Structure formats: structure tokens, C-alpha cells
Amino acid sequence: MEIQVKNLIRGDKVIWTVILSLSMLSLLIVYSATGALAFRQQDGNTFYFLGRQLFFLIMGLGIMVVMIKVVPVKAYAILSKVLVLISIGLLGLAFGLKLLHLPGVSSSGRTLYLGPISFQPAEFAKLALIMYTAKLLGVDQETEEGRIFAFWRIIIPTGIICGIILFSNFSTAALLGVTIMAMMFVGRVPFRYLGMVVAAGILLVIGLYILGKNVENLPGRFGTITGRIERFVNGDKESEKGITQADYAKLAIYEGGWIGKGPGNSDVANYMAAAYNDFIFAIIIEEYGIFGGIILIMLYLIFFFRGILIVKKANRTFPAFLVAGLVMIFTFQAMINMGVSSGVFPVTGQPLPWVSLGGTSLLFTSIAFGCILSVSYQNQKESKNAVEPAVQVVVPDEDQEIHG
């Protein structure tokens, strides 16, 4: 059995430990946080969402194992351009179907419903764009001209993808855009080009805010963006009644104290619409206390620093940039979720990676983890081949044969 597990668990063992730890926490907290949801949607069957989460977590772990054993890392570089084009098509389809309202096939703009299957094209686009960016940044790192050329080839699809996502999910568009910018910074793209993008991004946010305040019936969620900024800066009138999601999150953190109420003892989860998703960190603290929250933060930080170690050990540029991008986007996302729950950031719709209740989003996350672990396993194999001494065959000379 030990040999079989060793063959399955390949790549960085510390990251595997983090993933399995997050999986156990996910099952515990999803079961606790979905009680009210189960009564609303599943006639009180509280095990339904636990079983659903367990199914997707096991499927995700299986995807990681298969990716490490079967898919070579260079395949992601080869497919990256095609995947970006597919992601643009899916995002456009989701946005178009929201406007058309075709029977049998629908879209909320954020989620694409194809019969019994539903998924968020933005999750697919995040992976595709990071792979594409990693490939271009790794092509020519020797000259500034090469890095500038890579910048223009990256920024155009990034603008298209983030622009489409922006209509339905501002926080995801911003998260992806910041991650691509961070990758280009690591890739030594000249500061003047990155500065242009930062300036354009600031002007865009200001423009959206002004439009949201002065123009009614804007498409997409522009009005929602403005409202959330207003409530964060000036306070929420509903907060005076103590009934907002952010208020419930703060109450959960207060109720949890240092040691928490214990597993399954959350009260606030019964009143929060997003207790199992966007505000799940608050429920974790309510049940496991501030100490539990610190341990969770440490797990994500360990994941981040192990990712940096994998990048340092990579002998090729594409795998290094790929791991850097994936590690950054999931660490950023985790910090945003925690910041929203604690009131540090405005309310957004970012789940806690590999912990919040999910479906196909968990599978896309597992693909990202599979990429990271595949690079780690590739590093281990290359390191092992480098240190193994070549087998030498010694042929004795005639004198040695005689004296022997």
C-alpha cells in the first residue's frame, strides 16, 4: 500500500499536504455552512452538499494524479494559444446568451448553462491566459526588444478576456489582470509599459465609478461595482440594521474569538446567503477561532513559498512562469476572500480556493494544482538524473589480469 501511495503522490509533498489539509477543512466547513441551504433546496438533506463537495474533491485529486503521470508540462505551452482562443469564444458565448435568452441554453453572464452542465468560462480563461502568458514570457528573456514584443502579444488577449469578464464579474477581471501584470513584472517587462497599463486600469475604475453614479441601467454589473465602492467608503445604510452579509461576517468572527465554538456549531451560517462561499472564512473563524484562521493563512503561505521554491528549481522558463502565475492568482484570491470576510476589502465574489463550496470551479482549480505539481515532479526527475553518476565499466589491463 505504501508503494502504491508513493506512486500516486508525485511532486512536491508539502504542497500535497497543504491540498489534503484544505480538502479536510473544506468538507468540515461546507457541511456546517450549508445547513440552511440544504433546508431551502434539498428538503433538509444536510448530507447532500457534503456528498457533492466530496465527489468534486475526489475527482479533482484524481485529475491531479492523472496530469502528473500522463501529461507532459510542454503540452500546456503547445496548447496555450488554442486554449486562449477557446476561452474568448466561451466568454463571448456566455455574454451573448445572456442577451439572447435561447431556450434550453442560457447564461447569467458569469455562468454558462448547457443543459445539465454549468460552468464559469472565466475559470477556464484564467488557466488559459496564464499558460499563454508563461509561454510568451519564456520565449525571449535575453533582450529588451523580445520582452517588449511579448508584452504586446500578451496585453491584447488580456484586454479582450478581462474586458469580457468585466461585464459580469469585476473582481475576477481585476484579479486576473493583476496576476498577468505580476507575471510580466517577474518577466522583466520594462516598467514604462507596465506603468501604462496601471494608469489605464486606474482610469478605467474611475470611469466605471463615475458612470455607475450618473448613468442608469448600465449593462452588466457596473452599477453593482459603484454601489459596493460607495458602501465600502461611505458605509452601508443597511449596516445600521446589522443585516448585511459583511455584518454577519464580522459577527461570526467576533463570536468565534480565539478558540471558536467548535466544528458544526456556527450560528451565523444560518443567516448568511454566502456562508459556504464568499464569506466562508468568517464561518471558519466562528467555529475554529482566530487560531484556526491563522493556521489556514499559514497553509496558503506555505503553498505560496513552496511555489516559489518550485520556480527557483525549474530549469526552463515556461514551467517557471507557469507556476509563478498559478501560485500568485490563487494566493491573491485567498487573501481577497479573507480580506472581504474581515472587512478589509469591499465585498466581492471570490471564493476561498479549494475550500468554498464548488463544482466545476473545483475541477479547474485541480487542473491548476496539477500543473504546479507536474512542474515540481519534472524538477525532481531532472535533479535526480543530474546527480546520478554514470555507470562506468572498468576493463582491467593485461598486467592486472596476470597479477590477479
Image (cartoon, rainbow, N blue to C red):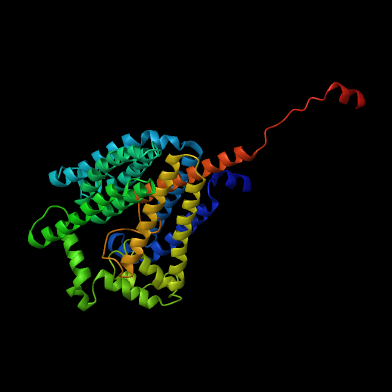
Quadrant hosting residue 105: top left
Residue at x 77% of width, y 28% of height: 394
Residue 1: in sight, yes or no?
no
**Horizontally, is 75 left or right of 119 in the view?**
right
Q: Is residue 82 above or below residue 222?
A: above
Residue 25: in sight, yes or no?
yes
* Image quarter of the C terminus: top right
Find the residue positioned furthest to the right: 403
Q: Is residue 366 above or below residue 85?
A: below
Quadrant hosting residue 244: bottom left
From the top left corner, tell me how far across and down residue 28 is, in percent. Answer: 44, 63
**Horizontally, is 119 left or right of 265 in the view?**
left
From the top left corner, tell me how far across and down residue 157 is, in percent. Answer: 26, 41
From the top left corner, tell me how far across and down residue 285 is, in percent. Answer: 40, 71
Find the residue positioned furthest to the top: 398
Nearer the observer, 396 or 331: 396
Q: How many marks?
A: 0
